Amino acid sequence: PMQILSVIGGVVKVEETDLKSRVGFLYPIDTHNISLFINASREQDSGQYMCTVNVVDDIIRMHKNVGLINLTVLVPPATPTCQLHGNAVVGANVTLSCSSKKGKPSPKYQWQREPPTLQVFFPPAQDQAKGTLKLTNLSLEMSGVYVCRAENEAGSENCSIVLEV
């Protein structure tokens, strides 16, 4: 464990951590609410935080003066990269792939073909976890713009690829 903030004798001390310029108590200490804030949260701020309260001359009961909370900082997906794997010729099979370098939790991927021939894809052709779309027995009519949306609870980003059969 690494100490972040402390109050001893009414004096607030902020420890030398990467949180130093971004952390503090939410309310004045005399309110007896020792909630803290973290500004400009980062993925690496995720983790377990522990609050310990020790009052002078009070009986310290094991685990009765400790509060724990788990913090998970969500990260929106980075703009994904769309790629074509295979030769886009009539009768062939190709795979479109989509991947995002960042995202917490891991993004889900959804492919769709843009208008004028709007088309949404489902398993087994599409794998939402891997970001792949398998197109089989290509025809000229399958040419068009295909868009991949990478999405998680924190946001979404798109990429597109033009398929010319």
Image: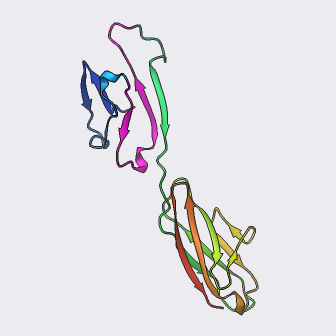
Colour pattern of the rendering: rainbow
Which residue sits at x=63%, y=68%? Answer: 110
In the shown orientation, is residue 62 left or right of residue 142?
A: left
Which residue sits at x=26%, y=37%? Answer: 16
Of residues 34 and 50, which is closer to you in this image? 34
Please say if 151 is above or below 117: above
In the shown orientation, is residue 160 left or right of residue 89?
A: left
In the image, is residue 38 part of the stretch drawn in magenta? yes
Residue 119, picture quadrant: bottom right
Residue 136: x %, y % from top left: 74, 81
Please say if 153 is above or below 133: above
In the shown orientation, is residue 86 left or right of residue 52?
A: right
Mark yes or no: residue 83 visible: yes
Question: What range is drawn magenta here?
Answer: 33-58
Residue 162: x %, y % from top left: 58, 85
Residue 75: x %, y % from top left: 47, 55
In the shown orientation, is residue 101 left or right of residue 121?
A: left
Image quarter in which the C terminus is found:
bottom right
Of residues 94 and 29, which is closer to you in this image? 29
Which residue sits at x=53%, y=71%? Answer: 158
Residue 4: x %, y % from top left: 33, 33
Which residue sits at x=70%, y=70%? Answer: 126
In the image, is residue 15 part of the stretch drawn in magenta? no
Image quarter in which the N terminus is found:
top left
